[in-house]
Image: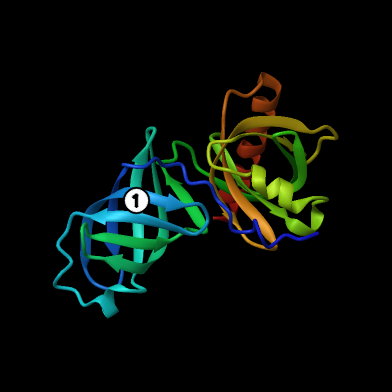
Amino acid sequence: MNMNPLAASIDLPITIGTELLVEFQDFTLRTKSELVGMRHNQYLIIMMQHDMTGIRQDVLKESQLIIRYLYRGSVYGFRTNVMNTIASPERLVFLSYPKKIEEFRVRSSPRYECILPAATSVEGLSADTVVIDISMDGCRCIVKSASLEDAEAFYKTMDINREATLKVQFPGVNESYELTGSIRNISKDADRVAFGMLFGSLKDKAKKRLEDFISLISEVKKKEG
């Protein structure tokens, strides 16, 4: 089972021409740019709007950046570094392809740490899963590569905004409850894939069980505090 080729493969939710907010970590600079090209899992090409002539090329190369942008109503962000620059005919910067991307949104309900056994189904493929935190809005999960029959195929299905189904085993009950939604952020490596899930419209029975569990864990946290 070869897991390495797709371990860091992520499809970015972005289109050519998207405006980007670029933050250089190595020196104080925030500027706007535009995505003008990319090669999947290899690099991104952005066109800088800021005049970079005052920054030495050796300093610019390997600079650490944070990129943020708006796409279909959600704000996404990722870390990257400068691979190369071109000054003419346009100021182009080549960036390393991100291994992790996150969606930034304000949570409307508190999230609680937990350990719940579950199973994730995406595009017809299933995987044993552990839910590590949960709220009425969504949850965060981990799938270990060693538990997968075909890690390469499963990793390929895990992308931002893809629909997913989570069958969760809540404590004190024998049956599993189905929570449906979409993948909102994801991080992949050779050993595991971690992802955040935003719940969609839940069935009444599953929603009630989720509410009961969160109410229980909330009371426990209050007593611990």
Residue 19 screen position, x and y as percent: 28, 44
Q: Mark 1 belongs to which amino acid?
A: Arg
Q: Is residue 114 left or right of residue 12?
A: right
Q: How many dots with numbers? A: 1
Q: Along the horizontal axis of the image, is 99 left or right of 180?
A: left
Q: Is residue 56 left or right of residue 2?
A: left
Label 1: which residue? 68
* Foreground of the two, 205 or 98: 98
Q: Could you tell me which residue is drawn at 73 percent across and 47 percent down?
A: 153
Residue 224 position within the rendered picture, expressed as x and y whole percent measured from the top left: 59, 55
**Of the pair 146 and 111, the residue shown nearer to us:** 146
Please provide percent x and percent y for residue 145.
74, 57
Residue at horizontal 14%, vertical 62%? 51
The secondary structure type at the circle numbered 1 is strand
- Height in image: 163 above or below 68? above
- Which quadrant does the C terminus fall into? bottom right
Task: Sort mark 1 into few (<14), some (14-19) or many (20+) by Cα contacts within 10 Å.
Answer: many
Where is residue 146, by image quadrant? bottom right
Q: Quadrant of the N terminus?
A: bottom right
Colour pattern of the rendering:
rainbow
Q: Is residue 85 left or right of residue 71?
A: left
Residue 124 visible (yes or no): yes
Q: Nearer the viewer, residue 175 or 129?
A: 129
Residue 84 vertical placement versus 47 (above, below): below
Q: Residue furthest bottom?
A: 58
Spot occupied by residue 78 in the image (x, y as percentages of width and height): 42, 56
Quarter-of-image position of residue 177: top right
User: In the image, what residue occupies the spot 65% across and 33% down?
Assistant: 210
